Amino acid sequence: MHTKRVDGQTAAVKERRAIWGWAMYDWANSAFATTVMAGFFPVFFKQHWSIGVDANLSTARLGLGNTVASLVVALMAPVLGAIADQTGQRKRMLIGFTYLGVLMTACLALIPAGQWALALFAFVAGSIGFAGALVFYDSLLPQVAPAQRLDQVSSLGYALGYLGGGLLFALNVLMVARPQWFGLADKAMAVRFSFASVALWWGLFSLLTFLWTPPDPVGARPPLGRQISAGWRQLIMTFKKIRQLKVAFLFLMAYWCYIDGVDTIIKMAVDFGMSLGFNATDLMLALLMVQFIGFPAALLFGHLSQYWGVRRAIFLSLCVYIGITIWGANMNHVKEFYILAAVIGLVQGGIQALSRSYYARFIPLEQSSEFYGFYNMLGKFAAIIGPALMGMTGLMVKWALLPVNPTSEIAAQVGLTATRASILSVMSLFVVGAVLLYFVDEAKGVAAAQNLDLH
């Protein structure tokens, strides 16, 4: 009996360590999402690496770079997942993509002014490393977390991501605002050090994930060419299997709609705020608010899902987002922007974390990498419809309301009305997503995943 109790305690310790090791990857890689992607790279690309270049041209280059990175990851994610399932190399692939991202982020600190092409290449490659690693990171969730704790563990990861990314971003913002406090010559040098700090943070904290999560299965690995061909064969099989997993497919369609709305608000909030006349300092502070409020809120949603159910918790988030779009369309003062940022922080991590864990119920455990490849592919194609919907709505409202030969005052007023209408259009994505989610039958989805013929 004593031996059994010791073995049980050892297994519990290993399980806790694996869970914390997995969750710490969110802490590690979120620094890239906050400091590099959302924070400093877009501004530094325009002001430093594209110095002397027309603003519209530099914006177009940056947009093209983001599109290329998203498309590459979206197209290769399912194949990479299939290869990982065929070979069992989830952690090996996670490590490879992680250090591609770390290396490219470190390179950003070394690229001189005016070298926009080099900077864009490093950013695109780093983004591919960041997003590619997420395919294998997400697929490890069912491997480290017991079925009854999927929602809590997923929420823990997002919570640590918000906290870790927020802490480093706050330090980086302070470095740029007061470079002399850190012995740096100017703001440009502070931004370079910020990029280097992200590479160091991401690379070092990821070691906890690599050391504490279970190792890949030991066995002979086929040559890369055979792995790729096997991955493509398995991908074709997945298209056949997804037709049997009707609940999983329906959830993915719902997820695609509402996460498009979530990502659109993330990516367009700063631009929307600037269009309303708010200054950059207020917008950066609001971004920091989202990070730090998102930390406890993601944990709270993990507990809420236990008592209320995951689907109801996601519905609650969608209702809040619908309210956010309505309020945003009528916002006039910067203090309202801060309040909206706080509300977004309350639900953003929750809907992301619970969506990830809810999907795990509807897929076979043995092929989690492959099916999470599809999940991440949809995530990368998200925020395509939303920004286009905002842009088209704004243009249509402007064309409809703008009179011939308007005065500058009338043109400005019409432009403001069009901007408000554009954010209101995003509400349709949350509504459609909620309607599709309503028809997701969890019991049928779980049963279908368990009974799926994998051969």
Image: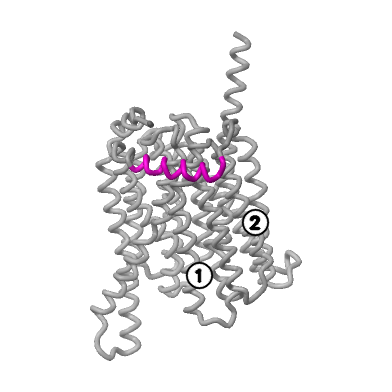
Q: Mark 2 or mark 1: which comes first in sequence?
A: 1
Report which residue position mark 2 lands on: 103
Assign a secondary structure to mark 2. Answer: helix
Magenta residue check for 237: yes
Local crowd size for mark 2, using a 10 Å CA cut-off: few (<14), some (14–19), many (≥20): some
Taking depth in this image into account, of 377 and 443 the one nearest to the observer is 377
Measure the alpha-carbon separation of dots 2 and 1.
20 Å
165 relative to 25, above or below: below
332 relative to 385, above or below: below
Assign a secondary structure to mark 1. Answer: helix
The quadrant the C terminus occupies is: top left
Residue 225 pos. (x, y %): 53, 45
Magenta residue check for 213: no
Instruction: Write the start and end of the magenta stretch as one range.
Output: 223-239
The amino acid type found where label 1 is placed reads: Leu
Residue furthest top as drawn: 1
Report which residue position mark 1 lands on: 62
